[in-house]
Structures are given as C-alpha cells and as structure tokens.
Amino acid sequence: MKKILAILMAGVLTATAFAGCGGGGESSNTNSGSSSKSGESSATGVNASTVDYAYFGNEDNVKLKVWAPDAAVNLVKKQIEEFKKTYSEKKFDITVIAQGESDAATQMLNDASAAADVFSLPSDQLNKLVDAGVIAPVAKGFTDFVTTSNSEDTVKAGTISDTLYAYPETNDNGYYMVYDNTVVTDEDAKTLEGTLAACKKAGKKFIFDAGDGFYACTFAFTAGAKIDGFEEDGITQKFVEYDEDAAVKTLQAFAKLIKDYKGTFTSLNVKNVASGFKNGTCGAGIDGSWDTKVNKESLGDKFGAAKLPTINVDGEDKQLVSMFGYKYIGVNGSSKFPNSAQILALYLSGEECQKQRTEELGWGPSNVNVQKDKVVTESPVLNAIKAQAENSCTQVNIASTFWTPMGNLGNKLVADEWKPDDADATRKLLQDTIKNVRDEG
Amino acid sequence: MTYVEYKQLNPFQRFAHNFKKFILNIPHALASFFKAIGKAIVGFFTGIGKGFKNYGVTFVKGDWATKLSYLIFGFGDIHKGKYYKGILFFLTEVLYALYMIFFGWTYLQKFNTLGTDVTKQGYNDLGMPVTEYGDNSMLILLYSVLSIVITILVFAVYIANIKDAYHHQVMRAEGGKPTSLKHDVKEFLDGKYHITLLSFPTLMIGIFNIMPMLFMILIAFTNYDQQHLPPGTLFTWVGFDNFSSLFNFVDSATKATTFIELTKWTLIWAVVATFTNYILGMVVALMINKKGIKFKALWRTLFVIAIAVPQFVSLLLMNQMLQTNGAINILLSYFNGGVNPQIQFLNSTTLMARLTVIIVNLWVGIPYTILSMSGILMNIPEDLYESARIDGASPVKTFTKITLPYMIFVTTPQLITQFVGNINNFNVIFLLTGGGPSTEQFYQAGRTDILVTWLFNLTMGSQDYGLAAAIGILVFIVCATLSLLIYNNSKSMKDEEAFS
C-alpha cells in the first residue's frame, strides 16, 4: 500500500507540477508578447476595416477559433478566406464553429479559456460578459472608426461605462409579423384583430411564441411596463412608470382576443411558422429576422412582412411594443492572439462583410453605409423591422431574471383556464411578474 | 402484538400494522444511524490520538536515522539498506516541496478570502486591449482543493515513511534484512494483488469523482452567482447563506417557496413514478408469463422494443405529440367533429401536466420492469407452486404467498435505485415539459420542475452556482437518508438467506 501510494503520488505530483508550469509559462508569454512590441509603432486611428500590419505586433502563426450562428457559418468561412488573402504576409489557422448566439455568453462564462477568440453575441448578454471580465473591449485605435461607421444606437448599446466593448454586427435583432398575403391583406395586417379574423376565416393559424420571454415581453411592454436598463445597483431591472389600471386593461384585451380566437391564435415555437407556411396551416406569425430566409422560401410570392400590429383596448388602437436588440462581434479577453482577434473582429464587422450578410442572409446591417444601400431600403422585411424598432425596448442591460417571469406571463395569458374578465387576477399576475423580474423576495 | 394475533389480521390491517411499525421504527433507525456516525467519529479521533502516540513513541525509540526520517523522507530506509523505497519517499518530499513552492501555495494562501486582486482591462501602446489578470476565485478554490488533497496524501506518505523506517530499524536489530525490489514487486502479484488491481480505479475515482465533489461542496458555501463571476468579479465565502435562503420565508420568500414546493413534488413524483412503473410492469410481466399464454417470446419482444428507441428521443417525440397542434390533439379532433380540441397537456393546469408526465413515464419505464420481472418470475422454483397447488391454494393465495414475497425480496434494492433515480430523473421532466406550466410563484422553476431540473435552470440560466450547489447537497442528503432507511429495513438486508 505504502509503496504503490508513493509511486502514484510521485506520478500525480509530476503531472500537476508540469501542468502548473505549463499554465504559468503560457500566460507570461502572452504578457511579454503584448508588451514587447511597445516600441514598434505608435497607434493612430484606422479608417477602414483593414489595418496596417503593425497592429499585429509580433503575432504570427495565428490560431483563432470563431463562433458563428449556424446559418452564417458558411458565409463566415468565406469571409475568413478573404481575410487571410488580405493579410497574406501572416499565417493563419482559423476554425469556424457553429454556436448559437443566445448560448455564446453562457459558454464564455463557463470556461472562457476554452471558448472562441471571436464570437457573435446579442446585445443583452454584453453586460454579463463585461461584469465577468471575459470580453475584451474594442481596441482604442479602432474605436473612432467603429463608432462613426456604425449607427448611433448600436454603438450606444455596446458601450458600458464609456467603453465600447464589442463590434456592432447587425441592427435587426427583433421580430416582426410575417404573413401569407393571400390570407391576410396588408390592410388586415395593421391590426391584431384584423389579422386574427383573416386567419380564422381561412381556417389557418396565427403563431406567436407566448411561452418564450423574448416574445412574451411584448404583452408587458405593450401594456406600458417597459424596461429602462438597471437600477443603480447594476443588477435589478428598472421599469418605467406606468399606469397599472391601463396595463391591466391591455393585458385583459390580449387575453380576450386569445380566448376569442382559440384555435387560431396558437402559442408555438417560431420554427412552426416556416413549416406552417409550407404546409398551408399557418396564415401569419410573429417571427424574427433570422428566419426571414426560410419564411421567404416557404411562401415565395405570397410573402408579406409588416411591423407588429395594433391591438384595440377600449376603442383605442395600441401599437404592440417589442424587444429589439442588436448583435455584436466580441473578442475573448483571454485570447492567446489578442491583436489578431481584434483585427479579425474589425474585419468581420466591416462594411463589406455586413453587406454580404445582408445580401445572403437578409440580416439588417448596423453599418451606416450599408443601411443606405438599396438592398436594405428596398427590402420589405428590413423596413418592417425598422418600423418596429421605433416601437420597441432596447435589448440591452437585461437582468438574467427577466426571461422566465415574462415567459410565464405569456403562458398564463394563453392558458385555457385563464379568465380574461378577472381584472384582479390579471393585476396580481402583472405585479408578480414585475416582482420576479426584479428578483424581490 | 403476538404472532397469533398478527396472523388473525386481514391483509389491510397487516399492511397498516407493518406500515405503522415502519414509521415508528424511523426514529429508532435514525437514532442508530446517528449513533453509528458518532461511533465512527469517536473511532476516528481515537485513531488520530493513537497515531499521535505512535508518532511520539517511535521518535523516542528510533535511532538517529529514524529520527532524521521525521524531517527527510526515506532517510531511515536508505540507512537500513532499503534503497528504492527510501528514494521514492525522498522524491515524494522533493516533488511536494516543489509543487507547493511554485504552484500550490500561490493559490492556497488566498484560500481564506478566495482572492482580492480584481482583473483589470488596460491597453498597450498599439491601443490593443490587454487584460491584466488578478485573482480568479474559481481557480483559487480549485487548486486549493487539489493542494489540500495532495497534502493529505503526502502526509499519509510521511507517516508511512516513519513507520517504515522504524520497522526496518527493528528488523535490523533483530538481524533481519530488508526485502529486495524484485521481491516486493512480486508481492504485488501475490499477497498484495488487491492493491495492484484496485489502485488504478481508486485513483480515477479520486480524480474524477471525489475531488470535483469536494470542489462542488465548497461552492455551496460561497456567493458564486451572476453578480460574482470571476475573473471580472470575485466571489467569497458566505457560510450557510445559500442554505438558509432556501428556508427563509421572510427575506427570500420566493426561493424558499420554490424549494419547499419542488421538494414536495419531487418526492410525490419519485414515489408515484417508481411504484406505478413497478406495479404495472409486474402486472404485464405476470400476464405474459401466465401459463397457457401463447407466443410469449413475441409479446415480450414487442414490449421490450420500446427500449430500442433511446429514451430522450421518445420523450422529445412525446413532447411534440402533446403540443396543441400535435398528433394527440389531431387524433382527438376526429372524435370532436373535426375540430381540434386544443388541449394544453403540458402548459395549462398543474394537475394535467403532472398526470401527463407520470403517464408518459409509464410508457418509458414499464418495458424495463417487464424485462427484469420476467427474469425473476422464470426463476421462482416450480416446486413451490406445485406443493401450493397440492395443498389446494387458490391462485390469489399463491400470488400473495409465493410470487409477491419472492419478487419484493429480490427487487427491493432495485426499487431503491429506481426511487433515487426518479428523484434525479432529469430526462423525463426536462425533455417532456421543460418544467412547465410556468408560474410566477417560483424562482426560475415551473410546476413540474423537480429539484435537479431546478438546479439545472439555476446553473445554466441564472448562474446561481452557489445556490445550486447547496440544493445538490440537500438532494444528496435526502437520497442517502431515504435509501439507507429503506434498505436497512428491507428483508433483503435483514434476511439474506431467505430464498436461497
């Protein structure tokens, strides 16, 4: 026993000792790497999405990992080939891995050192990553260029305590109404009542994912309970002041419509919108910009897009208010090639790449020049998103406790046993929802 | 109650009597459990005391080389001619010292605060962001645990080294000679073969089970949550705050309600899921095994085929089928005049969702019960039934007197594993309902969430790692206590020989 223990101990000790040395060595390498090039050049601002070789410092044989959402992987791979050609003097080994944006932050927080060097993320996860100190801010020399070339809103939402933390990528992270224009006319699509009536008449469904907080917050926002960043403590969700009586009435109006159009109004995952269009069971739905491509394919010429409709509350048409965010490209703070990662992120968020994404994937650009392009101005979808963006809450600084209670609010309103006439229950539900979002109690 | 009185009771009264006995026995069982723990603790400390005594006595009795072994590992062994062992001991000390100086201590010294130096972001001359890493609470905790475990192991080696030095001193004094390396290696294939066999599995369990577990247990005593994410923000020790927040109905009412309500549902779920599967599986197995049933192999195969589809696939399919536009509602619409009844199986009322989960679980679980039950049924000696028949026992009597006792005897341990497995049955709940129907009264949980799925939501959704670790510990305590209680009270434990 003693002997074997001694041998095993020796083995374990050597292993850990080596592991320890390895880790230490690496981190000191990176440090010396970034400081040794201090004298080589002084940083002046850049004015294009490509930069001088000096910005690489002494990094060569660069190995980077990039996370891109499933739909964009092929395009990003193509763009990276271009990137390699642009900087042909350097050697690159860049891998692109499919990783949904919504989980990117969680993966980063779980183990930043194993995560991607460059990744896309939605705006609401930025503050979490900044708090955890795992995302590197935008390089100083690039900040001015990024700020001027992208729209003001996207830059503002990417800035936390005066530091721009990520490269704006899209200006379209929101949902809008898609419809089969043989079922729902453009006129019908202006009101929720009209849309539902048209769908019911044709015996088709209206799909809205009321169980997902991302969509379901529309109920609360439309009712007036809009969010406004954080309280001073930096973690509690702040709501604007709203008239609770009016809010309750709005929620009741929603619940009543849902009940009246039971069978037409269905709460399903947004994936069902495209498949529903294809097999002819769906007349209209609320879906996001990321599904535009599949929805268009399913509907062909019958594709219609509009901002969210209005709902009639006590004779007054109220515009539905949605959640609207942006997408960014972020750089991992623990990247072994921090300079190259910044340069790649700058490149991928640049005008050319954004234009390609708009053309091929239908993503709304954040770049001001691409926004003026006719690909954008003549796209009904991007126009619908733009119109909806004016009636929205920005998806930035969202508490982690926001989604579940909002999803619950939606679930409750669509549940069979919910009584639209019960104002007290509705009031209680609204109060509890707000309380849970604010994590009080 | 005397034996005769007991025999005069009807089955229901007997069950009541046994049940009462079991409940009344719980305090006793708990008492003996804690007594055993107390005994173990006392034994542990007397052991330590004995160790200290031996430590001193050996030092007094030892010669100069043995005494030097107290500082330099393996010195006594080398002095007495046991070279290879002495060198191994010495190497351990050197490696341990190197490990501690260059690695272990840098983390271990911050163990009490879990770090104070926060990571900062700066820029280099190129304007590129540079992260100046400070402390990382998680790494400090992780490597501290590693260092502590290593220290304990090295301490064991240290004691072994002293004992060995003294042992060889005595051996030399008696004129003996230390054994050779060859002899000792051979010994590992002979007298110490168990060590050769088990050392590798033990090592692996230590590295992959015990150490992560220690780490996780310690996390329960920290405020590792979404506001304290290293390296940006550090976390620190908070004592029992995570545990008390689960029971505090004043300051953290939602969390406490969630915990209590989910614990209730978890236990109900575990009991109902286990017994419905068990009983219904047994019924089907009995039907198949009944004499005179034709094509037994066919029926058995048909039922077992359900296992061929991976559980998670059937669960995800079930989830789709139970949606308002799913297969089941569409089927029902044929009976409803072609109108889809839009029954919300999974996200309307609590009762409906819970019933649905239990019923779907039957479908997933019964084939396994049938499989094991058929085996057991075929194993019951035929002569038992024969003699029962000769004595004129009715089929019901044979079932309650032979089949049932035999099956319960054999399957009690399996029942316990199933029960514990159901307490932690993540798949069925998570894939089928995802916790729904949701509610505003719970914190990050829905009506059908059980404790483990809540734990998952807390870690993956809201990064409440500390709270989740605390829940994990409580779940473990519940599982361990229940399994020990039931197992120690079972016939299989008390009367091992009964059916052999």
Image (cartoon, coloured by chain):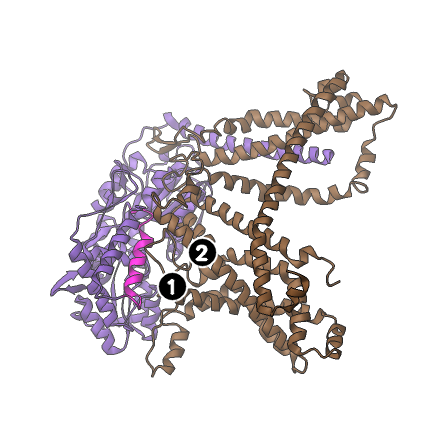
Chain colours: A purple, B brown
How crowded is the residue under tag 2: few (<14 C-alpha within 10 Å), some, or many (20+)? some
Residue B308 visible at all: no
Is B24 part of what is drawn in magenta?
no
* SS of the residue under disc 2: helix
How crowded is the residue under tag 1: few (<14 C-alpha within 10 Å), some, or many (20+)? some
Mark 2 belongs to which subunit? B
Percent coordinates x, y for residue A338 in the rendering: 40, 37
Q: Which residue is mark 1?
A: B350
In this image, A18 relative to B390: left or right? left
Q: Which residue is mark 2?
A: B264
Residue at coordinates 20% horizontally, 53% vertically from top-left?
A372
At label 2, the amino acid type is Lys
Q: Earlier in the sequence, mark 1 or mark 2?
A: 2
Mark 1 belongs to which subunit? B
Res. A295 image quadrant = bottom left
A353 or B74: which is nearer to us?
A: B74
B458 or A116: which is nearer to us?
A: B458
In this image, A92 relative to A18: left or right? left
Percent coordinates x, y for residue A89 in the rendering: 42, 39
Res. A212 image quadrant = bottom left
A71 to A66, vertically: above or below: below
Residue at coordinates 61% horizontally, 35% vertically from top-left?
A15
User: Magenta stretch?
Assistant: A398-418
Percent coordinates x, y for residue A42 in the rendering: 32, 28
